[in-house]
Image (cartoon, rainbow, N blue to C red):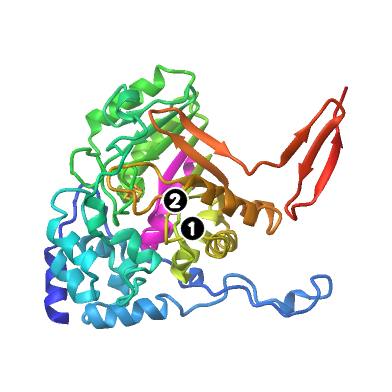
Amino acid sequence: MEQILCNQQITASADPQILGSEDDEPPDNYALTPLQYTGLSPFSRSESTIVPFPIHRTVRISPTSTKFRRRFFPGISSKEWNSWQWQVSHRIRHAKQIRAMLNLSPDEEQALDHIGDRLPLGVTPYYMSLLDANDPNQGLRRSVIPTIHELTQGVGEADDPLGEEAQSPIPGLIHRYPDRVLFLVHDFCSTYCRYCTRSRVVGHGAVFPDKKRFERILDYIATHPAIRDVILSGGDPLLLSDERLEWLLSRLRQIPHVEMIRIGTKVPAVLPQRITPHLVRMLRRYHPVWMSLHFTHPDECTPETARACNMLADAGIPLGSQTVLLKGINDNVPTMKQLMHGLIKMRVRPYYLYQCDPISGSAHFRTPVDKGLEIISGLRGHTSGYAVPTFVIDAPGGGGKIPLMPNAVIDRDEQGLTLRNYQKRTFRYPEMC
Ligand code: SF4
């Protein structure tokens, strides 16, 4: 079985236009373990009592992934495993491979039989190594392995719930807010999330990193001086080769009114091998570059991902996270708190918690809106403010992100406000006359 799997990987397709040449290997000193604390007061510890970060020179592949690699890719060296091109070209894409790696539930089995051309299937070997082979309810597994529920269209669901097509002046460009645009560089991801808002587009091979299309979009941005913030998205922009990505960044940097470039990516969670020294050296030439990283569950905070995030942070790239609230995956306070704390430890600032968009076939992922408010109540005041994301609904029909907060103002009169704190105690604040 293992040999069959290994041979199947070799036939998995990789787009040579997207993949670049072999990047250099990450240096050993980026392999890491958490800081080791001494237990002394921060005021009494000396430098010699703290093991500096990063410290570990041998952990290159976490034990879980090593076990998986040895079992399913027995001839593959750690160097190959650590190559992002190898990971992409060996993505697990076929039902036969998944059946060999996971004990499938009836819901998953039926999905693999019927999923057809809907959101494509793809999981990097690295991410697959994090899945629980025997638990179909494990958070990470539910987020990437289809179930039959995807095929049920619920009330109010749509393929393009955010109305992106209506706000697209050029294919692959969404201009919703006056000063920002979303630039879809291509429709390719290394791993496909089953709840993807853009499932109508991603993985269908219709949006290419085509120079002519890029030039049209660059012209549009150049002739709209109000645009000061460009968000590269897709698909995953970090699946472009370093050369193509650099070409795009350099062209954007030639437009004087583009102040900020953001890259939206799930790569550090699903393909941390992509964050190479060569990539971060290139990115830092185009500052200010920010990144919006997509995380779902604390199980994604592995040593490999921490290493990737630290390399990006060391390159001066501010990192924010975006998390979709998903039923049965992260819809409780302890899981969400663990995720937010994991992100902070990786130097990623929790940015948005999204109410799941009503995309077609998403009912099994969506929670009541109150669940998001309950989670924010369970975080705000109970942990560092930096660890509390903003809960938003991306308004169906293209209304943009609308923040929601638990109601803290319980009464208001001419003299002032009655406010409720995180302990549910009430306080008066005098209003200005
Ligand atoms: S990584 Fe982003 S664009 Fe790709 S499938 Fe997941 S949610 Fe969609």
Instruction: Give residue 123's position: percent from left, percent from top.
Output: 27, 62
Q: Is residue 386 left or right of residue 167?
A: right
* Number of numbered markers: 2
Relative depth, front residue between 381 and 361:
361
> In front: 263, or 392?
392
Dot 1 falls on a residue whose secondary structure is: loop
Image coords of residue 309 (percent x, y):
50, 59
Q: Give the crowd class for mark 1: few <14, some 14-19, many >=20 residues within 10 Å.
A: many
Residue plotted at (22% across, 58% down): 148
Tell me whether circle 2 and circle 1 mark residues in contact (CB < 8 Å).
yes
Q: Position of residue 181 (x, y in %)?
A: 42, 29
Q: Dot 2: what SS?
A: loop
Quarter the C terminus occupies: top right
Q: Is residue 101 above or below residue 427?
A: below
Q: Is residue 93 magenta?
A: no
Q: Residue at x 43, y 61 (%)?
A: 329
Q: Which secondary structure type mostly characterizes the magenta part of the structure?
A: helix
Q: Can residue 33 be seen in this snapshot? A: yes
Disc 2 marks a residue whose amino acid type is Thr
In the rendered image, the vertical position of residue 27 relative to residue 230, given as above or below? below
Q: Which residue is mark 1?
A: 331
| 329 is higher (above) or lower (below) than 263 | below
Q: Residues within 10 Å of mark 2 (few under 14, many from 20)?
A: some
Magenta extent: 262-287
Marker disc for residue 346: none
Within 8 Å: ligand 1 and the Cβ of disc 1? no
- How far across and how far down the image is residue 323, in percent? 47, 51
**Rendered image quadrant of residue 14:** bottom left
Q: Where residue 367 is drawn, which disc sits there?
A: 2
Asked whether residue 318 appears in the rendered view, the answer is no
